Image (cartoon, helix red, strand yellow):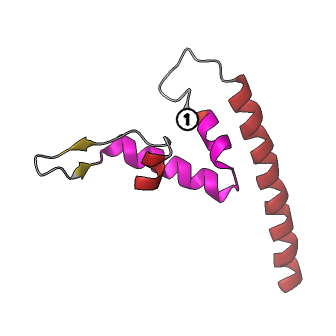
Amino acid sequence: MRYCEKEGLLPAPARTAANYRSYGHAHVERLRFIRNCRALDMTQEEIRMPLGPMGQPAADCGGVSRLLDEHLAHVDVRIAELSRLRQQLN
């Protein structure tokens, strides 16, 4: 979490009176999104791209849509490969 915060992928959390970080639901959801992107082998820069327009409904998302479409195609290829492997193993 601190790494994501340091790299600008996660906004700084509020602090308690004892100066502990206090992460909220929005932080958890954003971290879940980052983890899922990493599972798709997205680079840190590619992860930054969709994080920018998040929470900005008027933002142009064309580049983000293209990037995600490319990664979805990659997921489809991996699913097909895993299905073939499953058939071979059976």
Q: Quadrant of the C terminus?
A: bottom right
Q: In terms of image quadrants, where is residue 62?
A: top right
Taking depth in this image into account, of 27 and 4 the one nearest to the observer is 4
Residue 1 visible, this orientation: no
Q: Quadrant of the N terminus?
A: bottom left
Q: Residue furthest bottom?
A: 90
Q: Residues within 10 Å of mark 1 (few under 14, many from 20)?
A: some
Q: What residue did someone put label 1 on?
A: 51
Membership of 43 in magenta stretch: yes
Residue at the image point whose x is 43% and y is 46% from the top: 5
- Does residue 41 appear left or right of residue 56 in this picture? right
Residue 88 higher or lower than 25, as above or below? below
Pinpoint residue 14: horizontal percent, then vertical percent. Answer: 25, 40
Residue at the image point whose x is 86% and y is 66% from the top: 81
Three-letter amino acid code of the residue under disc 1: Leu
Q: Which range of residues does the magenta coloring cover?
A: 23-49
Residue at the image point whose x is 77% and y is 39% from the top: 69
Taking depth in this image into account, of 56 and 2 the one nearest to the observer is 2
Pinpoint residue 55: horizontal percent, then vertical percent. Answer: 47, 26
Q: Residue furthest top?
A: 58
- Does residue 29 appear left or right of residue 63 in this picture? left
- Does residue 33 appear left or right of residue 80 in this picture? left
Element marked by disc 1: helix
User: Is most of the magenta stretch helix, strand or loop?
Assistant: helix
Pinpoint residue 4: horizontal percent, then vertical percent. Answer: 47, 50
Membership of 25 in magenta stretch: yes
Residue 80 higher or lower than 18, as above or below? below
Tally of numbered tags = 1
Q: In terms of image quadrants, where is residue 89?
A: bottom right
